[in-house]
Amino acid sequence: MIAIYSLYIAVVLRTFARTEIRRLLPVYLALEFLYLVLFTLMLWRPIRWQAGQHLYFIFLSLLVLSLYLLFPKFDFVLVLFNPLSFQAALVFPGRIRWWWAAVCAMLTGLPLMLDLGMFGLAVALLPITVNFVFPAYVTVNQEIEARLRTSQALLDELQTANQQLTAYVGQVEELSAIQERNRLARELHDSISQTIFGINLHSRAARLLLERDPEHLDSQLEQLQSLTQSSLEQMRGMIASLRPPENGSAERSTP
């Protein structure tokens, strides 16, 4: 944007520098100021309806041509088509911006060619080129911004998916813990609790035999010992199943 306004300032300074147009200086300055006001308003408060946008660019094009026709030897005013080409690239999408870039290039070169012939074409080549460079710059910049927005949207989606996956993993871990608790409860109920219940019964029977029939106490104590040993082995097996695998522990401890 600084380059655009620099072009305008250059035109104004050249206007003051041309001694041949002293008597037309107020007209030049008034038209150039009108150009500046309309150009800036279009940047800050752009026209929304397309027909009005085209009328705006037609009017400013005629204004620049009027500046040129006031004193054709002051052909430097034709560079004011360069900011118009830049602004058209900001306002219009797709092919329309390039259509207006071509119009600005034609209006830059044609008056010089009609006035100076091939020399005029040579003089106009640089501003004609700039009329296409500005839209190309805007187009590339807009494409970069669009890709950045797409990348940011994709990154946001990935972050959301990662958060959802993290929550899902937490739910899976909680579900696994619940399932493991249920499994342990079933095993305790199905095996160890029944074994302990049997131990309790044999203990009572041993106590009765001790009082009434001590001769059969040994067999009862052997059964009690067998049940106790079985319960101890089942408990050890359950505790061992809860421990993590040794190779998994080794892998986690290895850097």
Image (cartoon, helix red, strand yellow):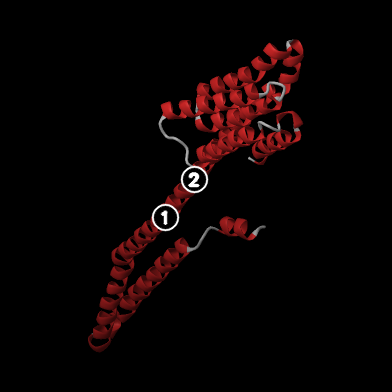
Q: Is residue 136 visible?
A: no
Residue 55 position within the rendered picture, expressed as x and y whole percent measured from the top left: 46, 26
Quadrant where the N terminus lies?
A: top right
Residue 193 position within the rendered picture, expressed as x and y whole percent measured from the top left: 30, 70
At mark 1, the secondary structure is helix
At 53% across and 37% down in the image, what residue appears?
Answer: 38
At mark 2, the secondary structure is helix
At 75% across and 11% down in the image, what residue appears?
Answer: 118
Q: Is residue 248 visible?
A: yes
- Quadrant in which residue 177 is drawn: bottom left
Q: Is residue 4 above or below residue 226?
A: above
Q: Nearer the viewer, residue 106 or 145?
A: 106
Q: Assess disc 2: are there few (<14), some (14-19) or many (≥20) residues with their C-alpha within 10 Å of its C-alpha.
A: few
Q: Assess disc 1: are there few (<14), some (14-19) or many (≥20) residues with their C-alpha within 10 Å of its C-alpha.
A: few
| Type of amino acid under label 1 | Ala
Quadrant where the C terminus lies?
A: bottom right
Q: Nearer the viewer, residue 181 or 14?
A: 14
Q: Nearer the viewer's eye, disc 2 or disc 1?
A: 2
**Viewed as shown, does residue 224 lie left or right of 59?**
left
Task: Read off the residue under disc 1.
Answer: 167
At 28% across and 86% down in the image, what residue appears?
Answer: 210
Cα gap from disc 2 to disc 1, whole angstroms: 14 Å
Q: Nearer the viewer, residue 138 or 16?
A: 16
Q: Which mark is residue 158?
A: 2
Residue 238 position within the rendered picture, expressed as x and y whole percent measured from the top left: 42, 64
